[in-house]
Image: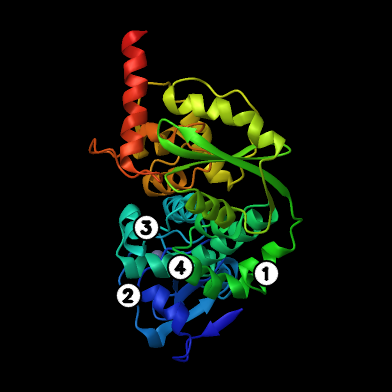
Amino acid sequence: MRVVDSGQDDVRWRAVVDRLPMPDQVFVYAVTTTRVYCRPGCPSRRPNRANVVYFDRPEEARAAGFRACLRCRPDEPADTGVARCVERARRRLDTDEAEPTLSELAAEAGLSPGHFQRLFKAWVGVSPKGYARAVRATRLRTALEEGATVTEAIYGAGYGGPARAHGEAGAALGMSPSAYRKGGAGEVIDYTMGDCVLGRVLVAATPRGLCAVFLGDDDAALYDSLRARFPRADVRPDGDSARAVLPTVQTLAAEPGRPFDGPLDVRGTAFQLKVWDALRRIPPGETRTYGTIAGDIGQPTAARAVARACADNPVAMVVPCHRVLRGDGCPGGYRWGTARKLALLEAEQDSQDQG
Ligand SMILES: [Zn+2]
C-alpha cells in the first residue's frame, strides 16, 4: 500500500531519519523528486520529508514507477549483520540470569543505546526491557510449575527480590507467586539434626532422596531455614530417611573430599541445576571461580548468577559450593559462614597432601 507522509507517520519517518536497518518487508520509502526507493537504513542523503512516500513492499514501489536505489539495494535481503546483532541481544535476554542493561546490549552491537533500543523494538516489537520482563515471567511460571519454592522461583527467574516479583509477575501470573505455588501438592520431608566438626548439622530428605543439608550453631535457626525453604511441606522430625543419612553427612563434614553416592532430591531452576551439577564435577582439593563455572555451563557472562546459585545450594558439602571462590582469589561468601568454607577447603587440602 502506498502511504503519503502527511506528517503523521512518525514511526516510519523516524526510521528513515535514524537510518534504522529494518527487517525485510517492513516498508521502503520512495522520494518523489528522485524517483528512487530505498530501505530505511539507506546511507544516502536524507530526503526532504515532504517528498517521501512509503510502500509496504519494494514491488509496489516499482509498480508505481520508482527505481531501486543502487546503494541500499532495497530488493535484496536486508543486512544480516543487523539481524545477527538483534538476535544476539535477544539470546542474551533469553538466557542470562542477570538482565543485561541497555548500554551493555548496545555496546555489544556497537550502537548508541537510543539507536539500539529503536532497532530492537523495530525487529522484536517490544523494547529490550519489555522483552526481559516477559522472559522473567515465563521462567517464574515454569519454575513454579516444576515444583520450585516461591523463593527459588523468584530468584531463579532473575527478579532482584520478592517485591519486584510480586509487582511485576503478579500481573503475568494473574496472582501472587505464592498463591500460584500453593496449587502444588504438599509433600512429606523428614529431618534430623546432629553434631559434626563444623557445629550443628541438619539433614532433611524426601522419599526420593536427600533434599537439605544445612550447617549452623543453633537448632532453632536451622529449623527455620528448613521451613523457609519448604514452606508448604509437611516437615516431620526424626524420620527414618533423614536418620539413615545423618552419619554419612557427619563424616562428610570431616572429610569433604569423599563422594556422596546417595540419592538426591534437589530442586531448582534449570540454571541452578546446571550450576550444581558443574560444582559436583570439581575434583576434591581443587577450586574454581564463579566465572569459570559460568564458562563451564556455557554462559560466560553469568558469573553473578552462578554466585547466587551457589548461595542457594540446599545441600552443603554434598554439592561442594565451598570449592568456588571469587575471581580475585578471596574466598567469597558462604551461606554457612566463611570460617566453615575455609575449614572445608583446608580439610580437602590436607587429605590431598596425605594422599
Ligand atoms: Zn537507498
The residue identified by callout 2 is 46
- Residue 55 is marked as none
> Of the numbered discs in the image, which one, if any, rests on residue 105?
3
The residue positioned 35% from the left and 14% from the top of the image is 352
Q: Is residue 200 visible?
A: yes
Q: Amino acid at mark 3?
A: Leu
Task: Check mark 1 vs ligand 1: CB closer than 8 Å? yes or no.
Answer: no
| Distance from mark 3 CB to nearest ligand 1 atom below 8 Å | no
Image location (x, y in percent) of residue 128 = 45, 65
The CA distance from mark 3 to mark 2 is 27 Å
For label 4, the residue is 129
Mark 2 nearby-residue class (10 Å; few <14, some 14–19, many ≥20): few
Secondary structure beneath label 4? helix
Q: Amino acid at mark 1?
A: Ala
Relative height, residue 197 to residue 148 (above, below): above
Specify the amino acid type for callout 4: Lys
